């Protein structure tokens, strides 16, 4: 049948429609739930805009929410089938059963395995050894800060790259004594922050079947060191013994106020130190302390993940693959002042975009630590029930520090607490 346009306006619309590329009608709209700690959301939006310019058939809508909503609302949405296509999450293993395996939709899965494998394991469900469900937006790493001005004034040499925990304790004590400051060495009150000390001493945390097995010889050695340093006054009781239960307590204020020689925390302190300390004194990040088994930090961080409930897995995979590419992830990290969880980038210098020289040096120092993280630390961070182990560690070792429990009793209670916690979760 022959078609005729009797109305000139309709005819014009019809002609315009015929001239529009078919791809314009096939645009896929994806939703990304995102939270921001700082300015990284703006960086992400800028990068997505550039993706959309080259991929006119895909549009990504960022739903920016509060951090609390990521932990409390997002799981409910996903479980009810109302979740987004992608989200930025911190409980990496908690929602793993809802993640999409991107592997069939990626042009080069080998690139992902080569550069992200230790972190991909954190997002896999139990029994999955090869799935690709997301990419870390940043990596956090524990490590030590020193007040370099105090070291210089005390004329105490800064220990070298392979210095042990004992070396650092000795040097920090000498600085504190010479400078007449109240604190030599402090560690955040956290089972997560204690883990590098234990792994360096040989702690494995798990048995051959992957079940928690905490109080081995390495863990005991580290626990003894922690308790002894408190008895000797090398570590201040205000931090670990200054709180009870599982409460976190840091020493960032003491460090920023020049009352502490060595502070073991992590790269998330860099931003506030740059602002608080300014040019009051020189501070720097030092290499990870060593033990007989390792010189490791403890990793952590957040990830951009894809959900299996999406109706557009191919388009989601294109967005994820774009963000995970080395060039894009490098720019995102440099502009956001994040450490990239990318094994290739970990071996290359990054140009962090900040005017603060100490902050820039500190970020680069932490970035160099990523390739040195021990496999036990990766396994511990990726264990879905590690919170039980962190909490039992900090609670019971504090009781050993205060004398409420002997060290043997504390180690027994840690094992019992974790066993009881796992039993409750299994119900």
Image (cartoon, rainbow, N blue to C red):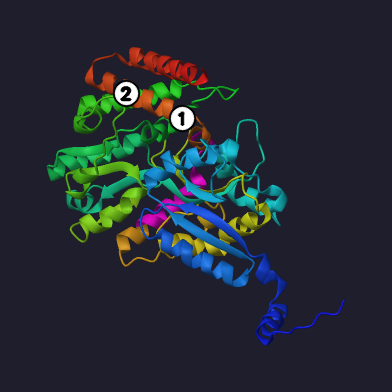
Query: Which percent across, then down, holds residue 384?
Result: 51, 31
**Does the magenta-highlighted stretch encompass residue 395?**
no
Pointer 1 residue: 386
What kind of element bears circle 2? helix
Query: Which percent across, then down, holds residue 156?
Result: 23, 47
Query: Which percent across, then down, holds residue 78?
Result: 53, 41
Q: Is residue 94 left or right of residue 390?
A: right
Question: Which residue is painted at 59% across and 45% down in the image?
Answer: 307
Is residue 203 visible to the viewer in this orientation of the structure? yes
Q: Nearer the viewer, residue 21 or 355?
A: 21
- Badge count: 2
Quarter where residue 215 is shown: top left
Q: Which residues are magenta?
A: 362-377
**Disc sitting over residue 338 in the figure:** none
Q: Cβ–Cβ below 8 Å for labels 2 and 1?
A: no
Pointer 2 residue: 395
The residue furthest right is 1
Instruction: Give the mark nearest the N terminus, 2 or 1.
Output: 1
Q: Main secondary structure of the magenta part?
A: helix
**Does the magenta-highlighted stretch encompass residue 373?**
yes
Image quarter hosting the N terminus: bottom right
Query: Which percent across, then down, holds residue 335?
Result: 42, 64
Question: Which residue is painted at 46% across and 17% down in the image?
Answer: 424
Few, some or many residues within 10 Å of mark 1 (<14, 14–19, 20+): some
């Amino acid at each position: 049948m022959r078609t005729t346009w009797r109305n000139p306006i309709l005819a014009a619309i019809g002609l315009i429609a015929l001239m529009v590329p078919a791809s314009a009608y096939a645009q896929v709209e994806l939703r990304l739930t995102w939270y921001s700690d700082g300015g990284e959301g703006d960086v992400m939006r800028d990068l997505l805009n550039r993706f959309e310019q080259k991929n006119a058939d895909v549009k990504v809508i960022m739903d920016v929410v509060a951090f609390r909503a990521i932990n409390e609302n997002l799981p409910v949405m996903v479980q009810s089938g109302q979740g987004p296509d992608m989200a930025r999450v911190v409980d990496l293993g908690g929602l793993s059963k809802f993640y999409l395996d991107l592997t069939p939709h990626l042009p080069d899965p080998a690139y992902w395995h080569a550069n992200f494998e230790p972190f991909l394991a954190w997002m896999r469900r139990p029994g999955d050894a090869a799935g690709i469900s997301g990419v870390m937006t940043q990596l956090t790493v524990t490590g030590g800060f020193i007040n370099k001005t105090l070291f210089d004034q005390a004329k105490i040499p800064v220990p070298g790259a392979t210095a042990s925990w004992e070396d650092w304790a000795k040097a920090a004590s000498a600085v504190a004594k010479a400078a007449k400051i109240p604190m030599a060495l402090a560690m955040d009150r956290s089972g997560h922050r204690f883990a590098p000390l234990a792994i360096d001493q040989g702690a494995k945390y798990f048995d051959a079947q992957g079940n928690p097995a905490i109080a081995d010889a390495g863990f005991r050695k580290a626990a003894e060191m922690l308790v002894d340093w408190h008895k000797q006054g090398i570590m201040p009781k205000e931090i670990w013994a200054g709180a009870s239960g599982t409460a976190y307590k840091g020493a960032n204020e003491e460090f920023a106020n020049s009352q502490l020689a060595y502070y073991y925390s992590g790269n998330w302190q860099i931003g506030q130190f740059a602002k608080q300390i300014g040019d009051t004194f020189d501070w720097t990040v030092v290499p990870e302390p060593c033990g007989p088994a390792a010189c490791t930090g403890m990793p952590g961080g957040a990830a951009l993940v894809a959900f299996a409930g999406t109706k557009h897995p191919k388009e989601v995979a294109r967005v994820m693959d774009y963000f995970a590419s080395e060039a894009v992830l490098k720019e995102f990290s440099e502009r956001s002042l994040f450490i990239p969880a990318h094994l290739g980038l970990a071996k290359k210098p990054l140009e962090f975009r900040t005017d603060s020289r100490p902050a820039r040096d500190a970020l680069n120092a932490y970035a160099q630590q990523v390739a040195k993280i021990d496999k036990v630390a990766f396994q511990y961070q990726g264990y879905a029930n590690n919170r039980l182990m962190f909490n039992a560690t900090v609670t019971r070792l504090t009781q050993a520090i205060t004398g409420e429990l002997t060290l043997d009793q504390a180690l027994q209670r840690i094992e019992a607490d974790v066993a009881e916690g796992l039993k409750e979760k299994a119900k």
